[in-house]
Amino acid sequence: MTAPEPFGARLRRAMDERGPLCVGIDPHASLLAEWGLNDDVRGLETFSRTVVEAVAGRVAVLKPQSAFFERFGSRGIAVLEKTVQEARAAGALVVMDAKRGDIGSTMAAYAESFLHRDAPLFSDALTVSPYLGYGSLSPAVALARETGTGLFVLALTSNPEGGEVQHAVRADGRTVGATVLGHLALENAGEEPLGSFGAVVGATLGDLSSYDLDTGGPILAPGIGAQGATAADLPAVFGRTVRNVVPNVSRGVLRHGPDVVALRDAAERFAEEIRTAVTAA
């Protein structure tokens, strides 16, 4: 049986061909209202289907936020399953934003929910939390290697509360965030053209020169658009690793709905701005 192509290789190709943009699918109740939709399963389905129709054939990555589907119970999960399947069928890579983190068989079950090829929610990658200890992610790492999928591990997040954990200094003098990045560098060692185990690092964090962001894998960077960061900020924040950055834009694109053309145009503007900033770096 031929081994599946690793996520990192597929992501590198998608970024090179479509531009390094990830569009979030975040059906907040407030966004549903802005689109003139009810905060119910029908509104959720219309919202998600419209985003997929508008951009799945054009951007490198779509990132549905699982929580906004889960809040509707089994019917919401059914919409999420369909959203993932249709996005992948249109050529986008899907990163499931579920931020799972647990230990042992429970972590293995979370991984199987999103990274097993027979799972209804099978995605190209999954966001995970390492804050029960990086080793707790081992079942997800092992399954990702087996299935050619990837992980994005929370490392240096943009929320203000994150610093109390991520910038904490360990007995060996390294911060917790730097330790996570070090583990990812080991996971990606020798992988070309891009490793499959990425870090989540906020684009709003400013100067990160004290951290070695070069893990050999991708960097998922939330914060472009509504959170205040711009494409032009990327080189200063990420330095020599900027070519491996996948900036995430959610509200900056989604607020242009429900018009499909307006959504598509917004995504293409962000993609071009990001491509220009990365190329000029």
Image (cartoon, rainbow, N blue to C red):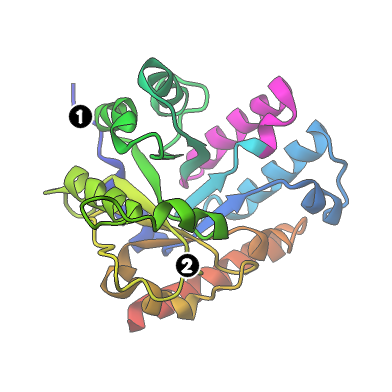
Q: Amino acid at mark 1?
A: Ala
**Residue 191 x/y as whole percent:** 16, 48
**Residue 172 x/y as whole percent:** 20, 52
Q: Nearer the viewer, residue 104 or 259?
A: 104
Q: Nearer the viewer, residue 101 or 224?
A: 101
Q: Is residue 9 visible?
A: no
Is residue 261 part of the magenta span, yes or no?
no
Is residue 77 part of the magenta span, yes or no?
yes
The N terminus is located in which quarter?
top left
What's the magenta region?
68-93
Q: Nearer the viewer, residue 228 or 175?
A: 175
Which residue corresponds to mark 2?
203
Identify which residue is drawn at 45% across, 32% down.
101
Which of the 4 image quadrants contains residue 169? bottom left
Which residue corresponds to mark 1?
3
**Residue 33 x/y as whole percent:** 86, 51
Identify which residue is drawn at 86% across, 46% down.
37
Q: Main secondary structure of the magenta part?
A: helix
Q: In this picture, is 274 found above or below 133?
A: below
Which of the 4 image quadrants contains residue 263? bottom right
